[in-house]
Image (cartoon, helix red, strand yellow):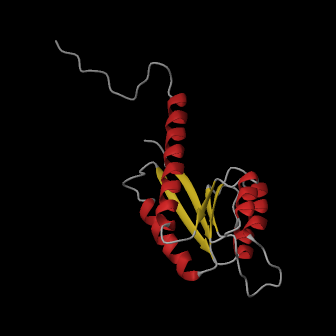
Amino acid sequence: MNAKKRIKIVIVEDDIFFNKSLEKYVQSVCNSSAYSSFDFEIKTYLTAHDCLRELEKDTSIMFLDYYLINMYKRTILSGADVLNRVKKTCPGCKVIMVSSLSNIQTAIELMRRGIYEFVTKNRNSHERVGEVLERLLRDELHALKQQQHSLTPPGVSGMRPPAQTR
């Protein structure tokens, strides 16, 4: 039996209601019946500072707000600041910016800096998040199957040989 691949998902959103709503939605997409090859770990943060303090090198996917307010710290970190740190700490992490950002130039610059996708916050945000997340998970599943296939010795298909009859 193959071990499940761990998928670590981080949500960084300072609006507690959107944060919890997004967390519940991501949990519903990442269900074990649809993606039985994966073991999901989902963490949420209300501040960029908390996220960066606990950021792990093997984080797979991050949903990141651009405008992050942190009333407890004097330094302000935007989604772009977090993106820079994420790219250094865990370069394989796919960052999806989810924001009400209306400046198209900033969105284009974020794409150049390496975000995987930009999702505008509106009443269809969760649907778009789901589409992007499912695409990422399908890609991960395909890569996992390719990896497992390449590890299978030649002539071994994983099937039992047919029973011999007399």
Residue nearest the observer in this picture, 102 or 112: 102
List x then y, in percent, for residue 134.
48, 53
The relative height of residue 67 versus residue 58 in the rendered view (above or below) is: below
Which residue is rendered at x = 76% and y = 57% of the image?
109
Residue nearest the observer in this picture, 134 or 147: 134
Left or right? Give the position of 35 relative to 62.
Answer: left
Which residue is rendered at x = 71% and y = 54% of the image?
111
The relative height of residue 111 versus residue 147 in the rendered view (above or below) is: below
Which residue is rendered at x = 62% and y = 61% of the image?
62
List x then y, in percent, for residue 26.
49, 65
Give the tally of numbered discs.
0
List x then y, in percent, for residue 46.
64, 78
List x then y, in percent, for residue 67.
70, 74
| Furthest-left residue in this view | 166
The relative height of residue 14 versus residue 26 in the rendered view (above or below) is: below
Residue nearest the observer in this picture, 100 or 56: 100
The relative height of residue 81 versus residue 57 in the rendered view (above or below) is: below
Left or right? Give the position of 69 relative to 3.
Answer: right
Quadrant housing the N terminus: top left
Quadrant housing the C terminus: top left
| Furthest-right residue in this view | 75
| Furthest-bottom residue in this view | 71
